[in-house]
Amino acid sequence: MAPYFETVKSFSEVPFTEDGVETAPFLEASDGLVKMFDLLGSGVFGFVQSDIRSNINGVRGRYEVAREKSGTLEELVRSESVETQKHATPCLVRLIRGLAFTCRALQNMQQDRNSELHVCFKRSYDEVLRHHHTFIIRSVVSVAIRAVPHRHDFYAKISQGGSVEKLDTELEKWLGGLERIVKHVSTFLEQGGYGRV
């Protein structure tokens, strides 16, 4: 079986031009991220996976009905902004939030090789999502984070028998692309008054 990052579209491969982030490849890479949560096992972060999937579908729905106006995420948001019904833009804001959380957690994992995964995800949650959630949601997230597999088990699942060195290289590229997209789209959304990530 091929290592996980060789089976999905990498965020580092998503075209990013002066017009913005191309929508279709971005959605494909986002679909790959959702599948990664399956590797965490036993429904851990099922709520995150469900939320991200729902938000991907919201953005995809707009893309499919208005392709000529949605070639990039920026075009999609701008074209929807003049309409009374806005569904894809709030979905994109929440999707970028979820991607930022995942990106930060995996960056923590890469940077702090001695910490277990739950510590890396907790740091990311506190930094990226905690301030968006109520006490009840925070409690649910706290329990879910404690159920994240051990670092060694996660690496074994995600490398699927491949070399850890190659995994680290691919993960670094993937995270670099994801971070670049998250920062760019977050800035675009906030500066345009479309939403705060």
Image (cartoon, helix red, strand yellow):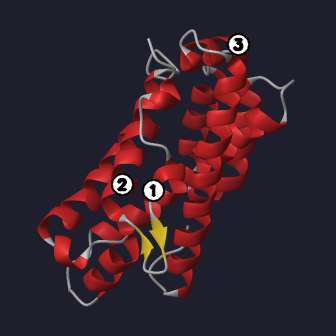
10 Å crowding of disc 3: few (<14), some (14-19), many (20+): few
Quadrant where the N terminus is found in the figure: top left
The residue positioned 40% from the left and 56% from the top of the image is 26
Q: Is residue 12 left or right of residue 108?
A: left
Q: Which residue corresponds to mark 1?
A: 14
- On the image, the x and y values in percent for residue 44 come to 50, 24
Which of the marked residues, 2 or 3, is nearer the chain's N terminus? 2
Dots 1, 2 in contact, CB < 8 A: yes
In the depicted structure, whether residue 122 falls above or below residue 91: above
Q: Which residue corresponds to mark 3?
A: 152
Q: Nearer the viewer, residue 184 or 43?
A: 184
10 Å crowding of disc 1: few (<14), some (14-19), many (20+): many
Q: Report the disc number at residue 25.
A: 2
The residue positioned 58% from the left and 44% from the top of the image is 174
Which of the marked residues, 1 or 2, is nearer the chain's N terminus? 1
Q: Nearer the viewer, residue 55 or 166?
A: 166
Secondary structure under the numbered disc 1 in the rendered image:
loop
Dots 3, 1 in contact, CB < 8 A: no
- On the image, the x and y values in percent for residue 15 come to 44, 62
Q: Amino acid at mark 2?
A: Pro
